């Protein structure tokens, strides 16, 4: 059985800290997620104003309190600079979660996403005892697919023309990993 802890956890890797979003993060979230390049690879609205960022942070806190999601602010450890978001929507009854993430464009192609996904998969499987974690990404965002493959996730298929993004139908790739696969890969 999956149980969320009462207090929001803080995770750490070599370069990153994962903490709860706070109201004071709204301006940075708006600035980073408000770029069309970031929105194009996500379901974030565009344009993205400060009010939307403030509401989004409040929703993440409510979802955590309800026990059906956890969303971490991705922070550079040395600079204590917020650079993005990673989280899981959790379906307790199925012991699974849907992973999603985004980074500000200045932080792309530096390995931060791979490091973040690895840390959150570890949290989901070892601390929440999830059985399965999956992650969709837009087919026209191959960098996201590379991140998911690097952490051991398997491409399970494509949902053709699944969403409309900026007036165009977009295919969605689905990647997944089971706890047993993750733990076996982590031991090697």
Image (spheres, grey):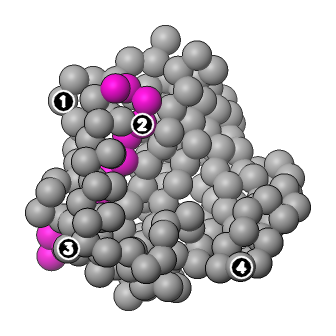
**Residue 128 quadrant:** top left
Q: Is residue 122 magenta?
A: no
Kindly identify the residue that appears in the image at 58 percent across and 78 percent down: 40
Contact, mark 2 vs mark 1 (Cβ under 8 Å): no
**Position of the C terminus by quadrant:** top right
Q: Secondary structure at mark 3?
A: helix
Q: Between label 2 and label 1, give the one nearer the viewer.
A: 2
Q: Residues within 10 Å of mark 1 (few under 14, many from 20)?
A: few
SS assignment at label 4: loop
Q: How far is the residue under mark 2 from the one under mark 1?
A: 13 Å
Residue 115 in the image: state x and y as whole percent. 44, 62
Look at discs 1 and 3 and give the one toward the viewer: 3
Q: Earlier in the sequence, mark 2 or mark 3?
A: 3
Can you give x and y, in whole percent of width and height, for residue 147 in the image? 61, 66
First along the sequence among labels 4 and 2: 2
Per the rendered image, the range of residues in magenta is 66-81
Most extreme residue toward the left is 24
* Mark 3 or mark 4: whose residue is earlier in sequence: 3
Q: Which residue is mark 2?
A: 69
- The residues bearing labels 4 and 1 have C-alpha atoms spaced at a distance of 41 Å
């Amino acid at each position: 059985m999956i149980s969320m802890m009462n207090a929001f956890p803080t995770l750490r890797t070599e370069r990153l800290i994962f903490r709860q979003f706070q109201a004071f993060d709204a301006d940075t979230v708006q600035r980073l997620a408000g770029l069309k390049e970031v929105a194009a690879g996500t379901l974030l609205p565009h344009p993205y104003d400060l009010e939307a960022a403030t509401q989004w942070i409040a929703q993440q806190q409510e979802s955590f309190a309800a026990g059906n999601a956890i969303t971490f602010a991705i922070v550079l450890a040395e600079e204590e600079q917020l650079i993005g978001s990673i989280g899981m929507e959790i379906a307790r009854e199925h012991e699974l979660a849907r992973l999603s993430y985004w980074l500000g464009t200045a932080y792309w192609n530096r390995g931060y996403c791979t490091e973040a996904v690895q840390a959150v998969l570890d949290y989901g499987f070892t601390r929440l005892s999830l059985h399965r974690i999956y992650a969709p990404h837009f087919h026209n965002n191959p960098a996201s697919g590379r991140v998911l493959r690097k952490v051991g996730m398997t491409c399970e298929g494509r949902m053709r023309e699944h969403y409309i993004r900026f007036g165009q139908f977009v295919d969605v790739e689905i990647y997944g990993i089971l706890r047993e696969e993750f733990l076996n890969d982590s031991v090697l």
